Amino acid sequence: MTLDVRPATVFDDVRAVIGPKSPDATVCWCLSHRVPSKVDHTLKGQERGAYVAELCRAEVAPGVLAYDGDVPVGWAAVAPRAQTSYARSRVIPHVDDLPVWSLWCVRVRPGHRKKGVSHALIEGAVAYARERGAPAIEAYPLDNGEARVDTTMAYVGMRRNFERAGFTFAAGTKSKLVGLPRIVMRLDLR
């Protein structure tokens, strides 16, 4: 598999990876940390997809997509932290005042897992943040040690995957997912 990671500017490709099978279904669309919770709760069904379509047309793409040839096989949400709910989080601390970017969701389509897609997505998100002038990038993965995590809840990533990409532990958090602690990991891009 030869992977190419690009900014997520093609809505149909984003939909193929994170959209619902039924266009009327209300699923995450990776908006829960991108928009204020009041907005997130008002967007239903096709409105969620329409919102993401607008994000794909914005100057800063809403994330990156991994492609195997022309087939989109994975997604990573990455954006300036100031444009996410992490900017106001009471459970994920700010390490300092740097205008960091956040990487909070990594998703690989079924049939393409265990082939290095998540690693390519992390690298691609880092490259995109660096190209856009980010001084550092943060992720908020599970500190799961050797514990197995169901793929539906592994979207925040695993500590070891970010360590492989050069991220280091920056802070603990008050956040838990599936009973496991989440941590702040950071990579300096300066």
Image (cartoon, rainbow, N blue to C red):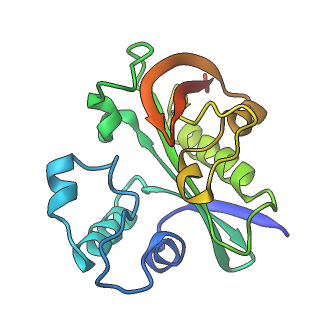
Residue lying farthest to the right in this orientation: 1
Question: Which quarter of the figure is the C terminus placed in?
Answer: top right
Name the quarter where the N terminus is drawn.
bottom right
Task: Tell how many labels.
Answer: 0
Q: Position of residue 123 (x, y in %)?
A: 69, 45
Picture layout, residue 190 above or below residue 38: above
Placement of 171 over or under 15, stated as above or below? above
The residue that appears at 34% across and 56% down in the rendered structure is 31
Residue at coordinates 34% horizontally, 62% vertically from top-left? 55
Above or below, 188 against 111 in this view is above
Rendered image quadrant of residue 47: bottom left
On the image, the x and y values in percent for residue 89 come to: 30, 29
**Residue at the limit of the structure toward the top, as seen here:** 96
Residue 160, given in percent of the width and then of the height, sits at: 73, 34
Q: Quadrant of residue 65?
A: bottom right
Q: Residue at x 57, y 42 (%)?
A: 131
Q: Is residue 127 left or right of residue 156?
A: right
Q: Residue at x 42, y 78 (%)?
A: 20
**Coordinates of residue 126 in the picture (x, y in percent):** 62, 41
Q: Is residue 4 left or right of residue 138?
A: right
Out of 75 and 92, give the one closest to the viewer.
92
